[in-house]
Structure formats: C-alpha cells, structure tokens
Amino acid sequence: MSDTARRPGICLVLLFGIGAIAMAQPVPLPPGTSGGDQEQQKPASDALEAVESTIEAKNYALAASRLEVYLSAHPEDGRALFDRGYVEDAQGHTDAAEGWYRKAIAVDPKQFESRLALGLLLAAKGDAGAREQLDAATQLEPNPPNPGAKAQADRALARLLRSSDPTGARDALVDALKLTPETTADTLLAAEIAESAGDGEIAEQEYRKALQSAPDSSYATAGLAHLLINEKRYADAQPLVEAALRRDPADPALNAQLASILNGQGKQAEALAVLEKLHKLQQASPSVTLMLADADLQAGKLDEADALYQQLLAQTPNDPGVLDARGQVLIRLQRYPEAIASFRKAVAVRPDDADAWSGIAFADSEAHQYQDELGALSMRSKYAEENPASLFLRATAYDSLHQSKAAAEYYQRFLAAAQGKFPDQEWQAKHRLAALGK
C-alpha cells in the first residue's frame, strides 16, 4: 500500500491533484464571499484566480506575497484564506498552514476544503481535534463539486477512527465507496477496521482479497500475518512472511514477524538469528536495534542486550521504555544500584510507570534498602492495583524492618492472592507467619 494511502496527514496537492480545487480556473465565488453587485465582485475574483495560477505553478513564494496583498484588501475572503494555508501546507509549514485554515473556517464554517485540510494536519499530529474537522468535512460539499475530494474526506475519517471507533470507520468507508471505486488501500482499511472490531474472519477475508489484487504488497502481507500470529496460526503465517521477505529481505516489520513466528514455535535460536541478520543490514535503525535487544534479553544474552540498550539510550537518553528494559537487564546482572538509577530516570519522564516502580522496589529489596523499597511500592500503588508480587515484596520489607504486625498482614494478603501459583514464596510466607506467631 502506498504511503499516500497509509498516512492521514498529507499535503493537499497529493489529495486533490493540481487543478482539482479549481486553481487557475474560473469558478463560482466560494462560500463566505460577500454578496453585492457581480460587476464589483469580478475584479476581486479575477485577481484571486491570477494568484491561484502561481500556486498551480508551485511558485509558492510569489503566491504568498500576492495573497498577502490580496488579503489586506479582502481579509474576510474564505477562499483566499484557504489558498494562503494551502501555500504553507505545500511547503511543509504545517503550523502556519493550520493557522490560516482556522481563519478560513472562522470566516466560513461551511468551507469543505479548509475543514478537510485542517483535519488532515491535526490527524498527522495526533490531535484529538482532527475528528471534529473531518466529521464536518464529510457533511459539506467541495466547491466546485468534486466526488473524489468528498470521498477523500470520508476515507480520512475512516482511517482516523479505525481503532477507536470501528463502527464509525466502517460507515465512513462505505460512504467513500458510494462516491468512488474501491481500491486496494480501501480493502486493507476494511481489513484493519474489521480486525479492530474483533471480527477476525472478515479481516482475514479482506486481507486475502487485497493480496489477490496486489500480491506483492508487503503491507497487506504484514497485516494478514499479524492477524494470523495473534491467533497463533504460525503455520499459516510463516509461508506468507517468508515469501514477502524473498522480495524485501530487509523489511524490519516482516523480519520481526518472522521472529515472532519462530518464537511462537519454540525456535528461539532461529528467531534470534533472524534479528541479528537484520541488525547487520540496518545497524542505524533504532527499531531494529530495539527488537534485537529485546530478543537478547528474552534469550538471556544479558551483556549483548545491555550493550544494545546503551546504544539506544545514547541516541534517546530519556526513553522510558528503553530505560525500563535496561533496568530489567541490570537486575538480572545483579547490578542493583545501576538498575535503580535506570528505573528512576524512567519514572522521572513517566511518573505513572508502574512497571518501573516495581523494578525499583525489587532492586531495593535485593540491595537491602527496605525503606526505599516501601516508598517505591507506595508510588506503584498510585498507578496499579496490588498483585501477589507487590504484596510479597511489602511483606518481606516489613519483616526485614522488624515490623511484625504489618509483615503478617501482607503475608496473609499475599497468600490470599497467590492461590497456589507461587509455591516457593507461599511456603516462605507460611513459614514466616508461623515464626511471627500468626
């Protein structure tokens, strides 16, 4: 699937095509233009069309300067305000473009073009306001009428909602398909929507339909493989991924999927070899380095994993996920003070990181820093419910501090939560309760 189909935030040049929004062509005055005698309006319309001819020619600097002159005389012209935003958008100046689109909408809330353009920019930034703008665009009409642009708004809304509101996404995609023919990108979007809705059967049908029309699509292959892997259908997923890798051997997503398939089949050594090979090809890729580091951690190759995590932290020193992962490595290496330092950097960035607080508590326990351990557990409890591990850590910390009443309480709570799943710790808890006379 093309990048245009996959990304919601995209310059309008790519969405509508040159001329599709009536640039450099005589068109009716846009919504929001002031009324009055048409002979008085015509010079202004002609002047704006002359400016738009420079936009079509991609002479954005000249267009911007001419629009500034035009807008100084016509500050309430919604079409000109949209054009001004378009000029910034086409140059990648998204913040400036957003401002102009908002001005156009303020002048004319029913202007389709600015609603769609602003929705796309906000979607690209992950701004929650994107839905409002795209919803509005789907209820409006382009000027002049343009079924392709209208369908683009529906598709953009469908992409935006595919995870958070699968039903709304499906309805938006159906509306798009009433206006323009279905594409492979549409089929893939339908598959993603069905998968988000929990309908694996429909999702699989759509992915396979996409592969029929685009058999070499790595994106479609990855989507279907992801579905099959989640369903633990490794034997079905493996030939798909291996065939795609023969076409694109360095694709990180496909290599990661093959590693997942091999792991799922109990072939950890083969999975690790796949990631090591990929890392040699893409040593500068943080995502590939992270995949290999995580695989090394799972395989018990702790020194190798630590070196890779340090490499990542040299590039992004405050990444809480990497700091957490390195903390786990350092715990296994019994380098507890360093582990605590790594976890504390993580919670400095993301205070609600319950896993990092758990890591601090465990490392403090191993380092015999029991008061600090209790402090970390108290912080963890703000963001996550108690579990057998946290209850046991509290009990042993209180026990080590000779706070017998609190220790007994937490040993009892641990035993009630453990339900026979932690036999060694449960034996210890019962032994300590007996010793404490409880």
Image (tube, rainbow, N blue to C red):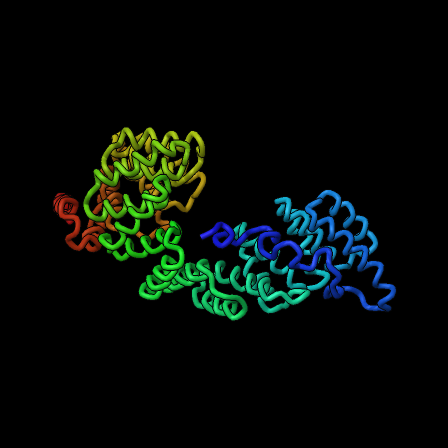
User: How many marks do you count on the picture?
Assistant: 0
Residue at (24% x, 50% y) in the render: 388
Q: Nearer the viewer, residue 311 or 195?
A: 195
**Figure quadrant of residue 284:** top left
Q: On screen, 421 above or below 296?
A: below
* 30 on left or right of 176: right
Q: On screen, 138 above or below 385?
A: below
* 189 on left or right of 302: right
Measured as percent of width and height from the top left, residue 373 is found at 31, 39
* 138 on left or right of 28: left
Residue at (50% x, 68% y) in the render: 177
* 146 on left or right of 225: right
**Figure quadrant of residue 247:** top left
Q: On screen, 380 above or below 35?
A: above
Q: Nearer the viewer, residue 336 or 137?
A: 137
Measured as percent of width and height from the top left, residue 19 is found at 67, 56
Measured as percent of width and height from the top left, residue 263 is found at 23, 45
Residue at (68% x, 65% y) in the render: 144
Residue 222 visible? The answer is: yes
Measured as percent of width and height from the top left, residue 67 is found at 77, 50
